Amino acid sequence: MMIIFIILPIFSWSVVVANLNVANLNGLKAQFQTAIKSFSDISSLHYTLAGIKELGVQLPDSYCDNINKLVDKSNVESIYHATEASKTLVNCKLPAEDYRAILTAVLQSEDSKTAEIYFAVRSSVNLGLTVDESKIEKRLNLLAKTDDSVVSQGYALLTGAQLSQTIAKSYADTINDLVQQADEIDGSILQYEGGIGATALIFNAFYEVAEKAGVPVKIDSKQLIKFATYFSSKRHVATLRSAYYLTKIFKHLSDNKNQVPVVVSRISPSAISPQNPSVLVSVTNILGQPVGEMSVVAESAKRKEDGVVVISKQKLISKASDFSVYELPFYDTKIPRGFYTIHLTLTARNEGKLIGLTDNMIDVKVTSEGSIENVELTVSDRDNTAQAKTYKLSYPNGQTDKLELDYHQKLTIKFQIKDKQSGEFVRVQQAFLRFTNKKSNKEIIYLAEPSDGANSQYKVEVDLITNANDFRHQSDTYEVVLILGDSLLQTAYEWKLNNNVQLTFHEDSLADKDHQKLYLPRPEIIHQFREDEKRPPNVVSLVFSALTALPLLVLLILWLKLGFNLAGLPLGLSPLGFHISHAAVFALMFFYWKCLNMFQTVRYLALVSIPLFLFGHRVLSTLAARREKKV
C-alpha cells in the first residue's frame, strides 16, 4: 500500500491551465437519460425532454400523457413547464382554454413577480394565446424599480424575447449593463451570484432576446471568453435545470451566427520523451467541432523554472483533414528536462467570428531517463571502533549475502541519481528507504536526504539505538528496498537492496500497535451531573422567614397602639394614582421573585415609575400647601 501511495503521484501530474475546455456533452446526456427513467414533477420532465432534444434525440409522443398527469392547472409555473415540455414532442398539444383564465389572472395581477410574468407570457405564446404587450412592458418597468436583482433582470430579458421585435430590441440594449454586474473570479471567469443556475439562465437570456431583436449579443470578446470558461469548467451540475440551460448555452457558443470561442487543448500525454516526441493540439469549438483551417504558431516555449525559451515562432503541422488537430515536434536532446509552457497563437484562414485565438497556453514536461549511480551500503560501529564494511551495488542487482547488525551498529546507504541525457546528477522528489519485517510485514520508511552542491549525494543512516523505537525493538529479519520517483523521470524505481538483513536490538521487543482499534467504537461517555448541595433543615428556613416578616408585624402593632390617622390623607385623583402606582411597584417585586427576570423587571419598573413620580410629586405639593395655610 505504501508503494502505491508514493508512486502514483508521480504519474498523475497535470497542470491546470486557463484555456477553455470542450463541453462535457456525454455527462449531460447521461444525466438526462438517467432522469427520463424516473421523474416525479413536471419541471424535471420539461428540462429532461428539452435537454435531450437539444442534444439531437427525439423522444416518443407517449410522454404527452405524463405531461397531462403532472401539470397543475392552477399554478402558472407548472403550466409553463407543461407547455415547454409539450413543444419538444411532435404531436402533443395542450388545450389552450384550460389555461387561459389562470394565465390572464397572473398577467393582470399587481402582485405578480417578474418570473411569474415570464411563465405566463411564455405559456401564452406556446398555447397560441394573445397578450397585451404594452401592459406587460409597463408592468416589467414597474417591477424593475422594486426588484433589481440579476435573476429578475434575466427573466425580464426572457419575457422581452417573447414580445415584439421593437420591445425585444430595447431589452437587448441593456445586455451590456447586466454583463457589468457579473462577478469576476481570479481574472479568468465571470459568473453571477446564485451560481451556475442563475448564471446559465441570464446568459441564455442574452442570446434569446438578441435573436428576437435581430441584433448581435453585445458582449466584449474578453468577457465572453470568461463566461465560456466558467461554463466549460462545469463538468457536472447538480440540477436538471442547470444541465438544460448549459446545453443551450453550448449551442449558442458554437453557432457561427454568434461569436465562437475557440477551444485549444492538448490531446497528447503531457510527458515529452523519445517515445512521445510531439505535442498534439486540438482546435475546436466548445462542442468539440472543427472551426476550419488555422495557422497555429508556437510563439514561445518557456521553462517555468528559469524562463529559458527553447522554442520560438514555430508553426504547427496540421494532422487532420478537418483541421482539428495540429502537431508540434518538441523533443530535442538539447532541451533539458523540466516543466514548460507553450504559448500558441491562432490565425483563421477565413474571416469569421472566432475569438480566443491568442494567449492560449499549453503545459508540458520534458522527461528523461535516470540511473542510480555510486550506491554504497555500509555497516559500521556506532563509535567507529571497528573497521566499517562497505558493499558497492549496481542497479538492478541487489546484495545476496546475509547482513547481520546488532544494537552496537548502524546501517548507511549512499547513492546518486544521474540524468542519462545530460550526464548531470539530479535531485528527485521522492527518495525513501523501506524496511519490511518479513514475519509481520510491518514497514518502516526513512527519508533519503540529499547533500548540498551540484553532485547531490543521497544518504540514509539507520542507528539501531536511536531508531530502535521505530522498529518496536523487534529483532528479526528485514527486507531493505530503495524507492525513487520523480515527475520528470520516465520510470520510478523500487530496488530491493537486500532480502535478508538480520537486526538485533538490545531491549525486549514491543507489541505492534493494532491500528484497527483506532476505528473501533469508544466507550460511551456518561455525563455525571453534580449532586445537589445539602439544604439546611426546614426549621432554619422558617425562622429566617419569620425574622423577615417581623418588621411588618411591628408596624401593624404600632399602628394598633397609636391608631390610624387618615384625616391628613388628601382626597382626589393624585393620591389615588400615587397609591395605585406604589402598589404596582410592590406587585412588580413579587412577580420578579416569582417569574420575571431582571431585564423584564427593569423595563416594567421604568414604566410604572413615571406615574408614581408624577402622582407622588402632586401629593407632596398638596400636603405642603396645607401646612402653609395652617401656619
Image: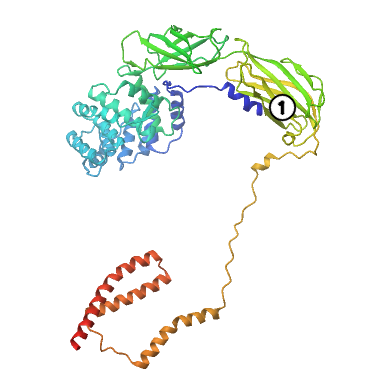
Answer above or below: position of 181 versus 214: below
Q: Which of 207 and 404 is in front in this view?
A: 404
Name above or below for residue 589 compared with residue 370. Answer: below
Q: Name the residue beneath numbered marker 1.
A: 461
Residue found at x 32% / y 38%: 77
Write down the quadrant of residue 80 in the picture. top left
Q: Find residue 594 and report its horizontal and vertical position in percent.
A: 42, 71
Residue 50 visible in rendering: no
Query: In the rendered image, is residue 522 in sight?
Result: yes
Along the line of sight, which residue is nearer the eye, 346 or 567? 567
Type of amino acid at the residue the image marks with label 1: Glu
Residue at 63% over, 52% down: 524
Q: x, y (%) of residue 502?
A: 80, 28
In the drawing, does residue 267 fall left or right of residue 579?
right
Residue ID at (30%, 40%): 76
Secondary structure state at the residue bearing disc 1: strand
The answer to whether 411 appears left or right of 421 in the picture is right
The image quadrant where one finds the C terminus is bottom left
Q: Where is residue 26 in the image (x, y as percent from the top left)?
A: 46, 24
Image coords of residue 407 (percent x, y): 80, 32
